[in-house]
């Protein structure tokens, strides 16, 4: 159902509008002058605003620009008196969707409105589809290792069930990605996916973001605002870094989960909410509970299912797959003809510990695609910290040739000191002459 606001100072005309629009199945709000109209616009959003252009207090052009400002997706139709079509054209230039001239037959008005609402319906649908398409492309979960396969299977199984989910895992392991994927394949996919970082805002701000507020609830609350719980109605709300929610906020969240209701700040009225909650934490919530930083009752409310994201070093088999995936993405972005990795570079990627997990890998690949001038990404385009580890884990039998190890160590020391041999020799605990000899032996200059 569409919400429509009709602003018209003429009583008879106002009644007519109300009648016709209600008959069209819309929920209609009327304002008897510009000021009352603006008041409505400040407090809530409408799909369509119909306004008289000429009113005693505030003219329709001002209403038009305010309506566009408050809700760019809403449409405005202006009503103009016979013989003043120029002002209607002016209004169209300023973003009005259409105009109608007084006097008009009810059918004529009906036609204009029907056209506008059809357009609005299409535009909304378009917006929804394109954002879904966007997310499908961006949110592929790459990986074939047992650990990530297990995660994918769990996601497939629980996404259609309307249950609360907790996602735990180190930074960069794909918690946001999983949350979006769950939403995308759930029954709520046509609803919104909204997210908020519980650690990034003060308690007061977070509360107002989540629950909304009434006009005048506090200084600066110039109009009524819907919070995320209301805005995500029918969709999913992702509470990121839930572990950093303050004790007060934890109580408020627990209450919403228990009652299924929220109260805007400054209001005494409860509003039912229909939102699926997914929460993420980059530290183990169990540990936070043991140390009394997280409420156990909230944890049990949230954690109907817990998904634990494996760190990248726990699923090294996926590194080549991910590396090629990101290389492909950035090759396109930077128009570079890079077809793969040298063996040494891939070895380094496989050996490194990846404290920043998939996000770090993505950044490393992006950087190396930019830096690399050859066809294959080589070790020289990788950042020092990725390369400078000895390759002990790498050898198939767990054994490395001493010579390989020495070569590798010298190489990374030289890289670390930007080729300054005396610093490298000192750090390695050998004389300058020995280093010189080994550099020659391994062809390192
Ligand atoms: N399996 C995967 N396949 C492809 N890309 C991935 C995968 N996992 C993570 N990524 C990418 O890595 C980056 C980091 O992922 P994401 O933001 O989901 O991590 P996070 O766990 O939420 O991190 P943080 O704790 O820092 O918020 C994103 O660009 C995401 O698209
Ligand atoms: Mg995240």
Image (cartoon, rainbow, N blue to C red):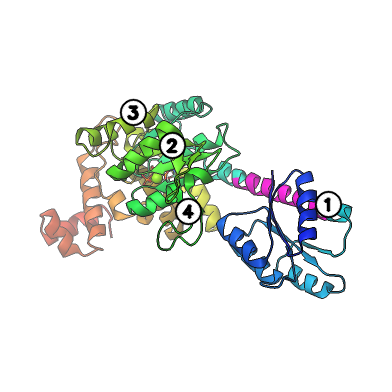
Taking the spot 29% from the left edge, 36% from the top edge, the residue there is 394
Question: How far is disc 1 from disc 4 in space, using C-alphas?
Answer: 35 Å
Tell me the quadrant of the picture where the N terminus can be found: top right
Question: How far is disc 1 from disc 3 in space, using C-alphas?
Answer: 53 Å
Q: Does label 1 or label 3 sit earlier along the sequence?
A: 1
Question: How far is disc 2 from disc 4 in space, using C-alphas?
Answer: 26 Å
Would you place residue 138 above or below residue 284 in this image? below
Q: Does label 2 or label 1 sit earlier along the sequence?
A: 1
Image spot of residue 179 (x, y percent)? 46, 38
Single out the mark in the foreground, 2 or 1.
1
- The residue that label 1 is drawn on is 110
**SS for tag 1?**
helix
Magenta highlight on residue 126 = yes
Single out the mark in the foreground, 1 or 4.
4
Q: Does label 4 or label 3 sit earlier along the sequence?
A: 4
Image spot of residue 388 (x, y percent)? 26, 50
- The residue that label 4 is drawn on is 214
Question: How far is disc 4 from disc 3 in space, using C-alphas?
Answer: 31 Å
Taking the spot 57% from the left edge, 44% from the top edge, the residue there is 137
For the residues labelled 2 and 1, say whether their Cβ atoms are less than 8 Å apart: no
Taking the spot 42% from the left edge, 50% from the top edge, the residue there is 265
Q: Which residues are magenta?
A: 110-131
Image spot of residue 311 (x, y percent)? 34, 37
């Amino acid at each position: 159902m569409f919400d429509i606001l009709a602003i018209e100072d003429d009583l008879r005309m106002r009644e007519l509008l109300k009648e016709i629009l209600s008959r069209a199945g819309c929920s209609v709000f009327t304002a008897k002058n510009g000021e009352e109209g603006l008041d409505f616009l400040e407090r809530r959003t409408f799909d369509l605003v119909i306004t008289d252009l000429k009113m005693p207090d505030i003219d329709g052009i001002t209403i038009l620009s305010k309506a566009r400002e408050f809700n760019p997706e809403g449409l405005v139709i202006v009503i103009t008196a016979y013989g003043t079509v120029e002002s209607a054209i002016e209004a169209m230039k300023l973003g009005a969707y259409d105009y109608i001239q007084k006097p008009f037959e009810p059918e004529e008005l009906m036609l204009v409105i029907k056209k506008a609402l059809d357009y609005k319906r299409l535009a909304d649908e378009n917006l929804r589809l394109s954002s879904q398409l966007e997310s499908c492309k961006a949110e592929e979960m790459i990986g074939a290792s047992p650990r990530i396969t297990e995660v994918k299977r769990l996601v497939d199984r629980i996404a259609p069930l309307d249950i609360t989910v907790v996602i735990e895992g180190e930074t960069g392991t794909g918690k946001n990605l999983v949350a979006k994927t769950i939403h995308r394949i759930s029954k709520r996919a046509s609803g919104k996916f909204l997210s908020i970082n519980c650690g990034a805002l003060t308690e007061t701000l977070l509360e107002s973001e989540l629950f909304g507020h009434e006009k005048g609830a506090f200084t600066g609350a110039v109009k009524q605002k819907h919070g995320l719980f209301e805005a995500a109605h029918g969709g999913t709300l992702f509470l990121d870094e839930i572990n950093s929610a303050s004790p007060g906020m934890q109580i408020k969240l627990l209450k919403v989960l228990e009652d299924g209701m929220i109260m805007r700040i400054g209001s005494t009225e409860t509003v039912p909410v229909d939102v699926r909650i997914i929460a993420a934490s980059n530290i183990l919530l169990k540990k936070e509970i043991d140390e009394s930083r997280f409420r156990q009752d909230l944890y049990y409310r949230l954690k109907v299912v817990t998904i634990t994201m494996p760190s990248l070093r726990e699923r090294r088999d996926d590194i080549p797959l991910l590396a090629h995936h990101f290389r492909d993405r950035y090759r396109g972005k930077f128009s570079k003809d890079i077809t793969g990795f040298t063996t040494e570079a891939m070895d380094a990627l496989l050996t490194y510990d990846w404290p920043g997990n998939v996000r770090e890998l993505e950044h490393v690949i992006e950087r190396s695609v930019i830096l690399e001038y050859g066809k294959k990404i080589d070790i020289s385009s990788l950042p020092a910290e990725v390369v400078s580890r000895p390759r002990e884990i790498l050898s198939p039998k767990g054994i490395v040739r001493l010579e390989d190890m020495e070569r590798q160590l010298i190489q990374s020391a030289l890289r670390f000191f930007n080729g300054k041999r005396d610093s490298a020799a000192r750090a390695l605990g050998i004389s300058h002459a020995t280093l010189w000899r080994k550099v020659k032996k391994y062809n390192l200059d």
